[in-house]
Amino acid sequence: MLSLHSSLLARRGGGLGGLVGWFIRIVIYDICITGISDVLGVSRMVALFIFLGILAVIAFAGYLLRNKYAADTADDF
């Protein structure tokens, strides 16, 4: 049963590889937030909100671009 459970975790991206990937993302986010905090001279909490705002703007721009190009390809037919 243990090998079945571990193979299911490996297939879903869990297990040790998923844990390592999660920690790498956390470290990268921490470096970004620390950098924003140091450059702008604000607290880490303010830097966190600035970082989240930047991510939201990037996501919104990607959403708009995807919809624009999806609408362009739909008009071609």
Image: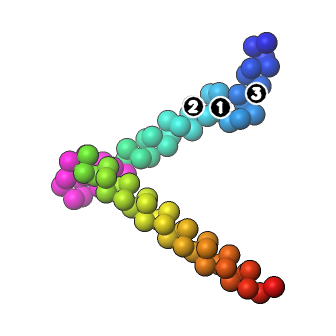
Find the residue positioned furthest to the bottom.
Answer: 76
In the image, 28 versus 65, the foreground residue is 65
> Residue flagged by tag 3: what amino acid is it?
Leu
Mark 3 neighbour density, 10 Å: few (under 14) some (14–19) many (20 or more): few
Quadrant in the picture for the N terminus: top right
Mark 2 neighbour density, 10 Å: few (under 14) some (14–19) many (20 or more): few
Q: Which residue is mark 2?
A: 19
Q: Secondary structure at mark 2?
A: helix
Mark closer to the chain start, 1 or 3? 3
Circles 2 and 3 in contact, beta carbons < 8 Å: no
Instruction: Calculate the distance from the C-alpha at mark 1 to the C-alpha at mark 3.
Output: 8 Å
**Magenta part of the chain:** 32-44
Circles 1 and 2 in contact, beta carbons < 8 Å: yes
Instruction: Calculate the distance from the C-alpha at mark 1 to the C-alpha at mark 2.
Output: 7 Å
Does the stretch in magenta take in 77?
Answer: no
Q: Quadrant of residue 62?
A: bottom right
> Residue flagged by tag 1: what amino acid is it?
Gly
Circles 1 and 3 in contact, beta carbons < 8 Å: no
Up-down: is 18 above or below 73?
A: above
Q: Secondary structure at mark 3?
A: helix
Residue 35 seen in the figure = no
Instruction: Name the magenta segment's main secondary structure.
Output: helix
Residue 2 position, x and y percent, is 75, 13
| 50 left or right, relative to 63 | left
> Residue flagged by tag 2: what amino acid is it?
Leu
Residue 61 position, x and y percent, is 50, 70
Q: Which mark is residue 8?
A: 3
